[in-house]
Image (cartoon, rainbow, N blue to C red):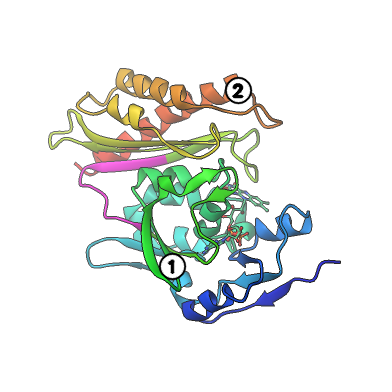
Amino acid sequence: MEQIEYVRPRSLTEAYDTLSNGRRSVFLAGGTDIVVQLREGRRSADQVVDLKHVPELMALRFLDDGTLEIGAATCCAEIYEHPEVQAKLPALIDSASLIGGIQIQGRASLGGNVCNASPAADSAPTLIALGAQLLIGSKRGTRELPVEEFFRGPGQNALEQDEILVQIRIPPQPARSGAFFNRFIPRNEMDIAVANAAARITLSADGSTIEDARVAIGAVAPTPLLATSAAEALRGKAPERETFEAAGQAAAALANPIDDMRGGIAQRRHLARVLTIRALENAYNRAKEGI
Ligand SMILES: Cc1cc2nc3c(=O)[nH]c(=O)nc-3n(C[C@H](O)[C@H](O)[C@H](O)COP(=O)(O)OP(=O)(O)OC[C@H]3O[C@@H](n4cnc5c(N)ncnc54)[C@H](O)[C@@H]3O)c2cc1C
């Protein structure tokens, strides 16, 4: 039987130090991906580094400028139960409250969801649509990366061997904007998305046109995608069904899906279109509330 050491750093410095001892490490935030992967032999490691005892990784707070800082190991339940997050970032609640079920949400973190780098990760499209930045740290210092640049392929992310995802930073959202996330699964809960999509729409001052937009789709390519062509199809246009249809088509054209037990290629392309349109319609409804 494989021996794996369990390490519990109490600070970021201690966590960085554990990564320079030459052992092959994996991190344990909620453990809802990594424990399964280790048990099934899909991953192997000499040590598991528990991140839940590092204060910076467990903090959740709004800064004075409105930026939300989410410690990478903060669990989904803590995020969706936070009244200010509920009021300011409902799209984040859409994602955090869909990941797994109640038990999973009490452990699973957004940091783990992002670092696991599944193409179907349910937080990814939302974080992309909201313009999130990732704060990455190591003994060498820190760096920031837009979340859409973090994903490198199924299970692959932009972290170097000595780096830890410290925080997810969501900037203050533009005035007159609204965002929404949705996914398709063949049953009501506890399943991996066949496809998912999120969108943020910013309306003009009189609400008659779309000033700006960010659209993201997931589970239809090796990584979650920022659909820039879909956003282009929206800018300067009236927020109506025809415009949303055009953006849905543009998003679907970017899809490069696989055929697997969850869904086929044609189905996933179709879903990329439909879920984008629904995300836009609902983002628009939320944006209208801010006018
Ligand atoms: C029953 C069940 C249902 C699920 N349903 C969903 C679902 O609906 N939608 C969905 O998207 N996912 C789902 N998942 C997958 C999983 O729950 C999520 O991906 C979850 O967010 C992972 O977070 P975690 O904190 O448990 O990550 P962990 O398992 O602790 O870690 C995941 C990976 O990220 C790395 N990691 C974690 N934190 C950091 C960090 N700070 N810095 C660097 N690397 C780090 C770890 O080394 C590991 O490789 C489900 C899983 C189960 C078991």
Asked if the magenta segment contains residue 174, the reply would be: yes
Label 1 sits on what residue type? Gly
Up/down of 59 relative to 187, above or below: below
Residue linked to disc 1: 137
Q: Indicate left or right for 48 with 238 as reference.
A: right
Where is residue 22 drawn, in percent x and y?
Answer: 63, 72
Q: Quadrant of ligand 1?
A: bottom right
Question: Residue 103: which quarter of the image?
Answer: bottom right
Which contiguous range is marked in magenta? 169-180
Label 2 sits on what residue type? Ile
Residue neighbourhood size for the residue with mark 2, other residues' Cα within 10 Å, grouped as few (<14), some (14–19), many (≥20) = some
Up/down of 33 relative to 214, above or below: below
Quarter of the image with the N terminus is bottom right
Where is residue 30 drawn, in percent x and y?
Answer: 60, 64
Element under disc 2: helix
Element under disc 1: strand
Does the Cβ of the disc 1 residue fall within 8 Å of ligand 1? no
Question: Circles 1 and 2: CB distance less than 8 Å?
Answer: no
Residue linked to disc 2: 265
Q: Indicate left or right for 268 with 146 as reference.
A: right
Callout count: 2
Up/down of 246 relative to 232, above or below: above
Which label's residue is closer to the chain start, 1 or 2?
1
